[in-house]
């Protein structure tokens, strides 16, 4: 019965005919409220998707429109620290690939490692450092080139549109760690010495899987706090959720302006 339901639910997403999907990180579910929503499909209908356990991650696909562009929102993601494998947490990406998604926009809540990148601002990811110790490609001979994981074309487009809508959009390197504990001040100093500008517990494995599937990828970190040793206050998940909710409106403006350009018929959807 579950297999039949999985196939039916996948067909609903595929029939929506969206080319863009957006994975929403902690505190960013309000982005969906700006969309003209058509249908919601719970993750529980898919046998391949594990149950979510983290506050702030609803666990459903929303078929909606932003500025008349059809989009699939993934409200919530699975994390390694929930005791899941790299293969399990990237099942959402593979499912979206099966549904015909060509462009994947990954969002997350992250700690800022760069003193110039203040909480409440957004950082566009231009590269990442995978410090999780694993990969969704383990067990397969998929030797994927990761030189340009995050599309140059999409980064240029988003940077141009951010300026036009007067949104401060930082750009930098995201470090993905296992979690669930936050980083120590010594670990933060290490990450800064490695060249990272933001740190979190998601995104890198999803990006690897999407790259292997040939998707165009854009990544964005909502900087919810300064990391340990930079921040004068103790870190908490509640702060992450609250700051994410406050920054979501600005990002919604960016998406509404950018999506019609991304999906314009005949536009070059491949990496530059």
Image: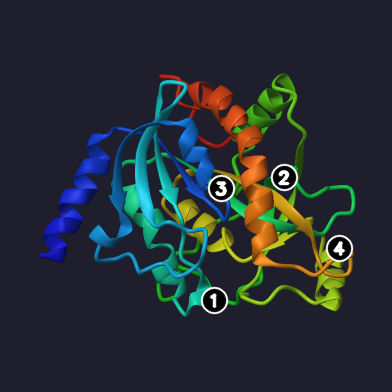
Residue matched to label 2: 123
Q: In the drawing, what numbered circle is on residue 81?
A: 1
Q: Earlier in the sequence, mark 3 or mark 1?
A: 3
Residue 110, percent from left and from top: 69, 57
Sort mark 1 into few (<14), some (14-19) or many (20+) by Cα contacts within 10 Å: some
Q: Nearer the viewer, residue 170 or 249?
A: 249
Give the Cα separation between the discs numbered 4 and 3: 22 Å
- Is the Cβ of the residue at disc 2 closer than 8 Å to that at disc 1? no
Q: Nearer the viewer, residue 210 or 78?
A: 78
Above-or-below relation of 169 to 206: above
Give the Cα separation between the discs numbered 2 and 3: 14 Å
| Camera-side mark, 3 or 1 | 3
- Is the Cβ of the residue at disc 4 closer than 8 Å to that at disc 3? no
Q: What residue lies at 37% left-to-right and 41% top-to-bottom?
A: 101
Residue matched to label 3: 28
Q: Earlier in the sequence, mark 4 or mark 3?
A: 3
Give the Cα separation between the discs numbered 2 and 1: 24 Å
């Amino acid at each position: 019965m579950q297999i039949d339901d999985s196939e039916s639910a996948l067909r609903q997403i595929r029939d929506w005919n969206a080319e863009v999907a957006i994975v929403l990180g902690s505190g960013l579910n309000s982005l969906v409220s700006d969309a003209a929503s058509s249908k919601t499909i719970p993750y529980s209908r898919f046998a391949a998707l594990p149950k979510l356990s983290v506050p702030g991650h609803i666990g459903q696909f929303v078929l909606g429109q932003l500025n008349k562009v059809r989009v699939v929102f993934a409200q919530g993601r699975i994390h390694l620290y929930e005791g899941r494998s790299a293969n399990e947490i990237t099942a959402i990406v593979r499912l979206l690939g099966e549904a015909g998604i060509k462009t994947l926009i990954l969002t997350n809540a992250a700690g800022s490692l760069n003193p110039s990148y203040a909480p409440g601002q957004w950082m566009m990811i231009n590269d990442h450092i995978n410090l999780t110790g694993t990969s969704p490609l383990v067990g397969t001979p998929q030797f994927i080139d990761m030189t340009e994981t995050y599309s140059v074309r999409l980064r240029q487009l988003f940077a141009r549109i951010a300026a036009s809508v007067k949104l401060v959009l930082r750009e930098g390197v995201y470090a993905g760690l296992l979690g669930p504990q936050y980083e120590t001040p010594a670990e933060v100093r290490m990450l800064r010495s490695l060249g990272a500008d933001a740190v979190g517990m998601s995104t890198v494995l999803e990006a690897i899987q999407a790259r292997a599937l040939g998707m165009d990828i854009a990544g964005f970190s909502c900087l919810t706090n300064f990391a340990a040793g930079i921040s004068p206050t103790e870190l908490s998940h509640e702060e992450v959720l609250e700051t994410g909710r406050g920054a979501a409106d600005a990002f919604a403006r960016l998406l509404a302006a950018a999506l019609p350009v991304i999906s314009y018929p005949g536009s070059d959807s491949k990496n530059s």
